[in-house]
Image (cartoon, grey):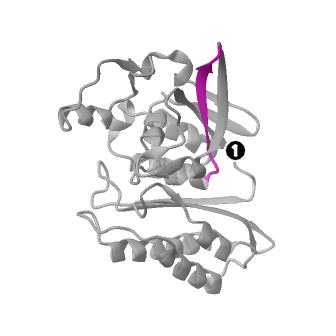
């Protein structure tokens, strides 16, 4: 039924009906699909079903990376985390969705599945390449986002994830930033940075990553990266924050990460 609207927790899609006054002829509730409510652990990665609720998804991620636990607790509030799903948050593609910057920093992929010519076909898409515009993605009309695949941490990984909002919980981000570093012999061997609230889509800070890669993780490198990340994005001003505030916060969150990594 390609005309049907897929629904998971409906924490956002429900507002399309109650506030946007949209109507759907058919609705399919993915939370009734047992296979999509599983978390599967493998040697190199974990696979989180699209219908796993946000609370369980963040707990699964935090089992490998405890720093994620307090970040996950900042996502909305307890009732929303119990109802909303990780797959729904990712597929919805809001530029202020909190899970996507973290998942981008972790190198996550989404598994898209479809029924074509009498058989199931699937493809893996890196999350940082999934979004094509504001709430637009590579998801085809006959595809379902079925799994979110996240690599397990390497021994030298260092991770930070920050959310800036007016309230401590049950609030939408003004800025979200996640940073994954691999330091070897005092230099940055690998780096991934995910950002939210600063572009039309959840974004990867590729220019800032390039300024960090191969450099010593010191204050001089930090200063260069701070200057780059302020230029890399062109955020909007809205009720949550001004564009200038968002650029300044991006810069200062990088400094916070550096200070924390230095102990």
Locate the N terminus by quadrant: top left
Q: Residue furthest bottom?
A: 220
Asked if the magenta segment contains residue 110, the reply would be: yes
The reply to whether residue 66 is in sight is no
Quarter of image, res 118: top right
Q: Which of the pair 120/118 is nearer the observer?
A: 118
Asked if the magenta segment contains residue 193, the reply would be: no
Q: Secondary structure at mark 1?
A: loop
Quarter of image, res 210: bottom right
Magenta residue span: 106-117
Apparent side of residue 165 relative to residue 59 in the rendered image (left or right): left
- Position of residue 148 relative to residue 119, above or below, is below
The 10 Å Cα crowd at callout 1, few under 14, some 14 to 19, many 20 or more, is some
Q: Residue furthest front?
A: 117
The reply to whether residue 239 is in sight is yes
Quarter of image, res 92: top left
Residue 185 image position (x, y, % from top left): 81, 72
- Position of residue 139 relative to residue 113, above or below, is below
Residue 106 image position (x, y, % from top left): 62, 51
Residue 109 image position (x, y, % from top left): 63, 42
Our reading of the magenta stretch's main secondary structure is strand
Q: Which of the pair 170/141 is nearer the observer?
A: 141
**Residue located 56% across and 19% down the image:** 35
Q: Which of the pair 184/91 is nearer the observer?
A: 91
Q: Which residue is mark 1?
A: 152
- Position of residue 91 relative to residue 2, above or below, is below
Residue 162 image position (x, y, % from top left): 46, 60
**Residue located 57% across and 42% down the image:** 61
Locate the C terminus by quadrant: bottom right
């Amino acid at each position: 039924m390609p005309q049907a609207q897929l629904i998971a927790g409906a924490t956002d899609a429900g507002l399309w009906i109650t506030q946007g006054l949209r109507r759907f002829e058919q609705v399919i509730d993915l939370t009734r699909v047992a296979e999509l409510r599983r978390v599967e652990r493998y040697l190199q990665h974990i696979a989180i079903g699209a219908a796993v609720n946000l609370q369980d998804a963040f707990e699964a991620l935090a089992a490998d990376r405890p720093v994620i636990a307090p970040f996950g607790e900042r996502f909305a509030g307890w009732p929303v985390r119990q109802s909303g799903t990780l797959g729904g948050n990712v597929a919805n593609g809001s530029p202020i969705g909190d899970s996507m910057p973290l998942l981008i920093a972790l190198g996550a992929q989404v598994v898209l599945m479809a029924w074509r010519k009498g058989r199931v076909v699937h493809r893996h898409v890196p999350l940082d390449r999934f979004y094509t515009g504001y709430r637009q993605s590579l998801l085809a009309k006959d595809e379902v986002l079925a799994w979110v695949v996240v690599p397990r941490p390497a021994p030298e990984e260092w991770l930070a994830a920050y959310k800036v909002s007016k309230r401590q919980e049950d609030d939408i981000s003004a800025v979200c930033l996640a940073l994954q570093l691999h330091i070897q012999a005092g230099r940055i061997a690998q780096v991934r940075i995910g950002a939210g609230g600063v572009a039309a889509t959840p974004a990867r800070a590729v220019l800032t990553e390039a300024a960090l890669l191969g450099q010593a993780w010191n204050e001089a490198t930090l200063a260069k990266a701070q200057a780059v990340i302020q230029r890399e994005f062109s955020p909007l001003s809205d009720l949550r924050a001004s564009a200038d505030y968002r650029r300044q916060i991006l810069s200062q969150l990088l400094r916070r990460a550096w200070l924390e990594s230095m102990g």
